[in-house]
Image (cartoon, helix red, strand yellow):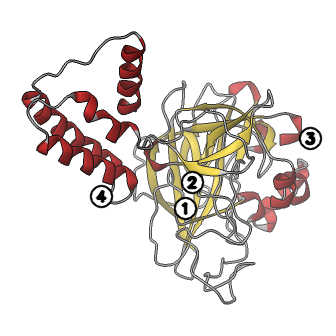
Amino acid sequence: MVAPVVSNGLKARREKGWAMRRVSIRPVRRALVGLLAIVATACGSTAGPAATAVSTAAAAIRTADATATASALIPALAAQPSATSVQLGSPCTTQGATTDGPGGARLFCATAPDGRMQWVFGNQGPQTQGGNQGPQSQGGGSGGTGGSGSHPIVPTGPVIDTLPFDLASVTQISKYRSCAGHDYSGQDTDFKSETLRSMKHYIYTRGEASLKLSAPFDGVIAWIVPEFAGSANTGFRVVVEKSDGAGGLWDVVFMHVEPLPGMAVGTSLRAGQQFANTSAPRLNWDFGLLWIRPGLGQQDPRKFGGLIFESPLLRLSPAVAAQFAARGVTPDSIILSAAARDASPCVVYEVRDNVTYFQSGPADVVTLR
């Protein structure tokens, strides 16, 4: 961005009839060479038109006569494209298009409530219906749960053995793939990449009450990490983990919670043992389920590369499923299909701290009876 500004300044001076004076630039020349070295590093590559232009300009400066004018050197930079990435919230034109954002983050083109198209942040790479080329994609062939290629087989059967919280204190639960809250998405159990949706469940409680949280199975505390900053009572993200019996891992992720004293990474838990309380006062907290394929080992729950997203409410033991069904929460009522969400995309209303927030409504939750 420096070169166009300087170039525009020179143009303005010429338009006002100001003549460029020939000056000795030996000291300035050395400074410019150093600056261009920094620019080359920022480009992140030694190849391509931008890097080539920087090298050319630097060479010109090094070999320039001591009385060369600055105006003779500026065009070499001004003519080159800017290496600045697209910014969050800036306008875009094609729904679903992708581009690189700040720090190499993948941005998606989405429609805001006022109808404007803007670049928003997503957790995963570009959405595709045939699977992406991220950590899970392994090539062609057959196998896996709805997957293709040498995808590992996602284990079937229940994961949640005991009810992890008291349903009597719960008023609503958000649907899987809802537009509640913010983007929380990744690869599904068909090894297809999904984005701009909430692939977890928000739990809404009566009067912002704190709930006791119990281990959903015999397992271990794998992670305790702070939640994102920027709002009050965010608490911690706690992961309770167990083996899937086939070399992989199941992670139940509890978000916005407060671990009990003495709980730490590596603490073993028995099914039904309390390990935390939800952060309070808060209108809601949330939980999700992740599968880690064999060979990956423990993964940071705040980073989604290499993880498979699943609804914990699809992996309930019969006894726990009956308790949810008694309150009106069944797979038919709580799960929104990927196709249904694709046909009715979430509407983005804000991008803050690299998090994409959605406009939500009554259709995003199930009210417990």
Name the amino acid type tagged 2.
Gln
Q: Which residue is mark 3?
A: 369
Measured along the vertical axis of the image, is residue 109 above or below residue 220? above
Q: Which residue is mark 2?
A: 273
Query: Looking at the image, which is closer to me, 120 or 309?
Result: 120
| SS of the residue under disc 3 | loop
| SS of the residue under disc 4 | loop
The percent position of residue 209, horizontal first and vertical second, equals: 68, 29
Name the amino acid type tagged 4.
Thr
Mark 3 to mark 2 CA distance (whole Å) = 27 Å
Of mark 1 and mark 4, the one earlier in the sequence is 4
> In the shown orientation, is residue 349 left or right of residue 214?
right
Residue shown at 58% from the left, 75% from the top:
137
Q: Nearer the viewer, mark 3 or mark 2?
A: 3
Residue shown at 36% from the left, 32% from the top:
3
Of mark 4 and mark 2, the one earlier in the sequence is 4
Q: Which residue is mark 1?
A: 270
Quadrant for the C terminus, please: top right
Residue shown at 13% from the left, 22% from the top:
23
Q: Quadrant of residue 291?
A: bottom right
Q: Nearer the viewer, mark 3 or mark 4?
A: 4
Of mark 1 and mark 3, the one earlier in the sequence is 1
Q: Quadrant of residue 292?
A: bottom right
